[in-house]
Image: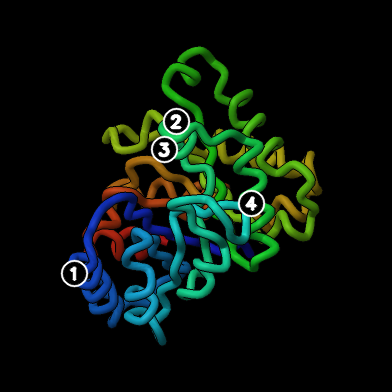
């Protein structure tokens, strides 16, 4: 059975004291909760070490928001996989649409990062998704296929099963718009069929595919009830403990 994963991408939000407050709120809110999913928080780099200490001995897992594919060197402001591992990260978000559009990350670069994460025993949360213009022009499936095929280039079946894919339609990120459950499921089913072509049906059935894009407590149940949606990559709603836990409870 595929693992359900709810990951919170804090983006460039919350300083250290605010991070401590949020983590404390999440931990307190989980005291009487039995969640049928893995809960992952991805704070800014400045809060990772403190977050790791605070979530020790809890069910919460830690992830980074990005990393570079080189181990070390003259790469000012970049973070390596070993640095993330050293502060307790188990996950790392790669290929987020904001990295693609604002910082010009290509499928080729993202592929290198995924390979490095895998060899470093980090679980990549590999983000894909189309813009509003691409959806309206009818090219959603072409865009998603290109991102998946190039992002997973030269990654074998065994490693593919260690990757989490997050489908995030760019037009639904931070806009308040959400793909309908039918729209989201259609693309998720397409991604799974594509994974079946690239690998096998058995491998495709093992890979967790999250949905991301204005996921909130009031739409989480209908999205997560779809057969090919295995969790969520949450943005704004993960910055409040009660809403993040409610999305986890929707599993």
First in sequence, mark 3 or 4: give its number. 3
Q: Are marks 3 and 2 in contact (CB under 8 Å)?
A: yes
Secondary-structure class at tag 3: helix
Horizontal and vertical percent for residue 248?
A: 37, 63
The answer for how far apart the CA atoms under marks 3 and 4 are is 17 Å
Q: CA distance from mark 1 to mark 4?
A: 31 Å
The crowd level at tag 1 (other Cα within 10 Å; few <14, some 14-19, many 20+) is few
Q: Residues within 10 Å of mark 2 (few under 14, many from 20)?
A: few
Q: Is residue 18 above or below residue 67?
A: below
Q: Which residue is mark 1?
A: 17
Check the picture and name the quadrant holding the C terminus: bottom left
User: Looking at the picture, does residue 205 appear above or below residue 29?
Assistant: above
Q: Closest to the observer: 96 or 27?
A: 96
The residue lying at 43 percent from left, 60 percent from top is 6
Distance, label 3 to label 1, CA atoms, is: 25 Å
Sequence order check, earlier mark of 1 and 4: 1
Residue with the mark numbered 4: 114
Q: Which mark is residue 101?
A: 2
Which residue is painted at 46% across and 63% down in the image?
63
Would you say 145 lies left or right of 23 here?
right
Q: Residues within 10 Å of mark 4 (few under 14, many from 20)?
A: many
Residue 113 image position (x, y, % from top left): 61, 50
Q: Earlier in the sequence, mark 3 or mark 1?
A: 1
Which residue is at the far front?
A: 74
């Amino acid at each position: 059975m595929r693992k359900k994963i709810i990951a919170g991408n804090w983006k460039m939000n919350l300083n250290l004291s605010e991070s401590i407050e949020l983590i404390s709120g999440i931990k307190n809110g989980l005291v009487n909760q039995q969640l049928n999913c893995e809960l992952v928080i991805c704070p800014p780099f400045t809060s990772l070490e403190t977050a790791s200490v605070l979530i020790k001995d809890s069910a919460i897992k830690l992830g980074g928001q990005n990393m570079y594919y080189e181990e070390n060197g003259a790469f000012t402001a970049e973070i390596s996989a070993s640095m993330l591992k050293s502060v307790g990260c188990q996950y790392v978000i790669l290929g987020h649409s904001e990295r693609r559009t604002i910082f010009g990350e290509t499928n080729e670069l993202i592929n290198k990062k995924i390979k490095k994460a895998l060899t470093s025993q980090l679980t990549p949360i590999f983000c894909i998704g189309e813009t509003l213009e691409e959806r309206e022009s009818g090219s959603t499936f072409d865009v998603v296929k290109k991102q998946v095929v190039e992002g997973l280039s030269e990654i074998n079946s065994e490693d593919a099963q260690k990757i989490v894919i997050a489908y995030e339609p760019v037009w639904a990120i931070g806009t308040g718009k959400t793909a309908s459950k039918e729209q989201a499921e259609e693309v998720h089913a397409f991604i799974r069929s594509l994974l079946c072509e690239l690998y096998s049906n058995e491998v495709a059935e093992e890979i967790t595919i999250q949905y991301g894009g204005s996921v909130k407590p009031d739409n989480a149940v209908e999205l997560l009830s779809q057969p090919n949606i295995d969790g969520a990559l949450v943005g704004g709603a993960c910055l409040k403990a009660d809403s993040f836990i409610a999305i986890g409870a929707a599993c």
